[in-house]
Amino acid sequence: MRPDAALDPSRRRAARWGLALLAPPVLLAVLAPLFGKPRAGPMLAAPSLAHPFGTDDLGHDLLLLLAQGARVSFEVGGYATAIALLLGLALGLVAAFGGRLADDLVMRGAELTVTVPPLLLAIVLVGLFGAGNLLTALALGIGTWPMVARVVRAAAYGLRGQPHVIAARALGVSRPMIALRHVLPAILPLALSLTGVLFSGAVLAEATLSFVGLTDHTMPGWGHIMAHAGPYLRDAWWLWFFPGGLLVMTTAGVAWIADAA
């Protein structure tokens, strides 16, 4: 957290707005296992007391579908963010403390990775191994680790000349131990500040893959629900309004909370 974050009213407001926006999607994701599987009912029923968010073209309760979609989005977003952070932290420290050859290999690997869009990588992996939330998260995490690695490498390079790091090297402490004990704790908050960007990007990417039908159809995401709304844009506005709104609330809420941290 920034030193002046607690004193800045605008950041506190941003955090409150972010929490308010993020609360409904999080609540849906938490309650999803309690709702059970959607059962067939009246097709394309408008929002009512019986079906607060209406039903889809197959008669499934949209609220239950959105709850399942929330669980998918947070699962993929969380795993993808964790993978990107772990890979980025590890490889960024290797680049900074592993010598010139290691630095060149990591940076060339990062340059090669960013030439392949994460969505394209996910499409290839899904085509080879089949759809699955963990596979989607793995592809998105692998595709975004260079962002973290570059930030970590630059910060670690800046810390190599600090007195406590120089003293540790003079005492014979190995480079890996210096990186883990003296550098990692200092740069970890900087790496975690990228969480909002990584998570929001992963959620949007999962929605895009779901929209084009490249995710697990047994657990439809918000994009999958919006894709089925195409033929009913005029007659069933709730099919795109509610999943689109939850997607915006999730990404905007995470972004505001990350900006306020």
Image: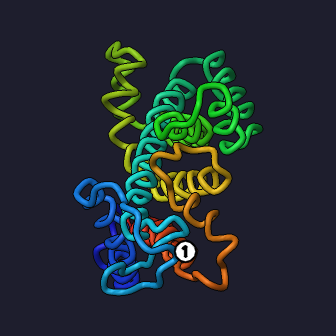
**Is label 1 in a helix, a strand or a loop?**
helix
Residue toward you, 206 or 92: 206
Where does the image place residue 233, in percent across and percent down from the top left?
66, 79
Above or below 126: residue 76? below
**Residue found 59% across the figure and 66% down from its top:** 226
Where does the image place residue 36, in percent across and percent down from the top left?
28, 55
Residue toward you, 7 or 139: 139
Residue type at mark 1: give it.
Answer: Leu
Above or below 50: residue 22? above
**Residue found 74% across the figure and 37% down from its top:** 116
Judging by the rendered image, the residue that carries numbered circle 1 is 239
* Quadrant including the C terminus: bottom left
* Quadrant including the N terminus: bottom left
Q: Residue lying furthest left in this view?
A: 34
Regarding residue 157, the answer to whether it shows in the image is: no
Where does the image place residue 102, in percent across and percent down from the top left?
61, 18
